[in-house]
Amino acid sequence: MKTTMKAVQVLAKGEPMRLVEVPIPQPEEGQVLIRVEACGICHGDSKVIEGWASEYPRIPGHEVVGTIEKLGKNISKWEVGQRVGIGWHGGHGHTTALSIDGGYAEYMVAYEDGLILIPEGITSEEAAPLLCAGETVFSALHNSRARMGDLIAVSGVGGLGHLAVQYARKAGFRVAAISRGEEKKELVMRLGAHLYINSDNEDIVQALQAQGGAKVILATAPSAKAISPLIGGLDRDGELIVAAVSDEPLGWSAMDFLKGTNAVKGTFTDINEMEAAVRFSMLTDVRPIIEIFPLERAKEAYEKMMAAKTHFRAVLKINA
């Protein structure tokens, strides 16, 4: 067996990603060695470059699918040869790609309590984005105030939004998709939206209120300008769920919350919801639309994702 592997590292805060050759890590007690097959590229990967990692160099990547190749001591749940996935929750209190190395590599080690089983019937490349992007919007809808038949609005039809539209339709909601221009309208309607709102030439609030207001609006576009007006499109007992990563202030006042018993909340990944998201995706045939890159082009793929030029999720195919 070879002793080194290709990996993409961030050497220090603010440094660009670099392809390197490093020793293959060995699993310690409670860990397994995973032969990585696919790793999704997510906006959250920017946090490694921004300096959120506990130490450097650090390997990014928190949407990881691969096969267990070696067991550390005292592993009771997993066996060699099983295909598993790992998201942000790295097990043992760790955060994948921030406090332990992630999946932009041919191999990675992971704690056994951070893993879920990836069933047959879905490719590793399709499964990887479900472990963060998919789970984030699935969890938001699953734990929302909405019930079957209610109006769900998905703001932003990108890596998260195109999955949210599918989940919402498959779960029995009326679905309104909000995006700029007409370019995505045909695809969004095929994915299950009942209504498309072009924010370039339509007033989002008026369009949603004409439908009676949305029970839930899921904000997936990382822009305060896109998120701020959405609260006006809720019905009197609606809920705005922010799934987008943005540091910009949203600029609401108390008056925005005096129009009904509305609520605003965020959403984040949870390992139990991750398993549920994968199961639901399998049962209802929800799949991400992906653009595949080899590990050697990870930096290019990351930059394309950050520029919102990916169609719709970028995935590294590794150990093909």
Image (cartoon, rainbow, N blue to C red):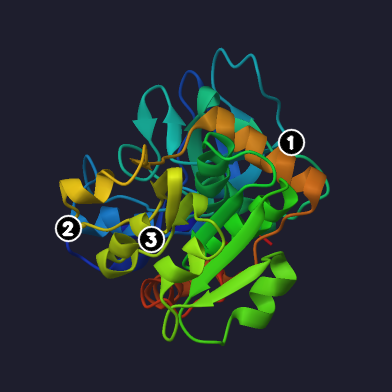
Q: Which residue is mark 1?
A: 81
Q: Which residue is mark 3?
A: 43
Give the residue drawn at x 26%, y 43%.
258
Nearest the viewer among 156 and 73 is: 156
Give the residue drawn at x 57%, y 50%.
134
Left or right: 27 in relation to 169? left
Q: Which residue is mark 2?
A: 251
Distance from the alpha carbon under mark 1 to that under mark 2: 51 Å
Give the residue drawn at x 71%, y 25%.
79
**What element does badge 1 sit on?**
loop
Give the residue drawn at x 22%, y 48%.
56
Nearest the viewer among 317 and 213 is: 213
Categorize mark 2 by other alpha carbons within 10 Å: few (<14), some (14-19), many (20+).
few
Instruction: Choose the circle earlier in sequence order: 3 or 2.
Output: 3
- Mark nearest the camera among 3 and 2 is 2
Left or right: 120 in relation to 224? right
The reply to whether dot 3 and dot 2 touch (C-beta < 8 Å) is no
Res 49 → quadrant:
bottom left
The percent coordinates of residue 201 (x first, y second) are: 43, 86
- Mark nearest the camera among 1 and 2 is 2
Categorize mark 3 by other alpha carbons within 10 Å: few (<14), some (14-19), many (20+).
some
**What element does badge 3 sit on?**
helix
Amino acid carrying label 1: it is Gly
Amino acid carrying label 2: it is Gly
The percent coordinates of residue 135 (x first, y second) are: 55, 44
Instruction: Choose the circle earlier in sequence order: 1 or 2.
Output: 1
Amino acid carrying label 3: it is His
The reply to whether dot 1 and dot 2 touch (C-beta < 8 Å) is no
| Badge number at residue 242 | none
Left or right: 103 in relation to 193? left
